[in-house]
Image (spheres, rainbow, N blue to C red):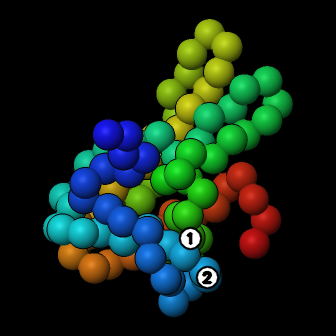
Amino acid sequence: MYKPLPESITIKQSGINGLGVFAEQKIMQGTNLGMSHIKLDDQIIRTPLGGFINHSNTPNCTKAELKGDKYKKWNLITIQDIKKGEEITLRYTFYNI
């Protein structure tokens, strides 16, 4: 069965904006949660993970850029421990807020 998100996270109503990504269990600092964005030609495409992550000025994740021959992709990496039930956030760099 296809699962667009890791077992450790889910999407639900956010106090920040609309829907957000939340920890289903404790997630340790340095965990790679998977690909959030990919750039093909000049278009940035959000994955299910990237489509629901909300902005914060004090984020608990960052994007790590990985380059291929014909693309760039970004994985979401935790920069601190995240408690069960806590919203996973990122400082937006691709979009104006």
Mark 2 lies on residue: 17
Residue displayed at 57% across by 16% down:
68
The amino acid type found where label 2 is placed reads Asn
Mark 1 lies on residue: 54
Residue displayed at 65% across by 21% down:
71
Which corner quadrant of the image does residue 97 belong to? bottom right
Relative image position of residue 22 (x, y in whole percent)? 36, 71
Question: Relative to residue 72, is residue 22 depicted above or below?
Answer: below
Toward the top, the furthest residue is 69
Label ID, residue 21? none
* Residue 77 in sight: no
Relative image position of residue 30 (x, y in whole percent)? 26, 49
The amino acid type found where label 1 is placed reads Asn
Q: Nearer the viewer, residue 18 or 75?
A: 18
Q: Is residue 59 left or right of residue 79?
A: right
If you read the primary sequence from the N terminus, does the residue marked by circle 2 or circle 1 appear first? 2
Disc 2/disc 1 C-alpha distance (Å): 7 Å
**Circle 1 sits in a helix, a strand or a loop, which is it?**
strand
Relative image position of residue 1 (x, y in whole percent)? 32, 40
Q: Nearer the viewer, residue 84 or 57?
A: 84
* Residue 92 in sight: yes
Crowd rating for badge 1 (residues with CA inside 10 Å; few <14, some 14–19, many 20+): many
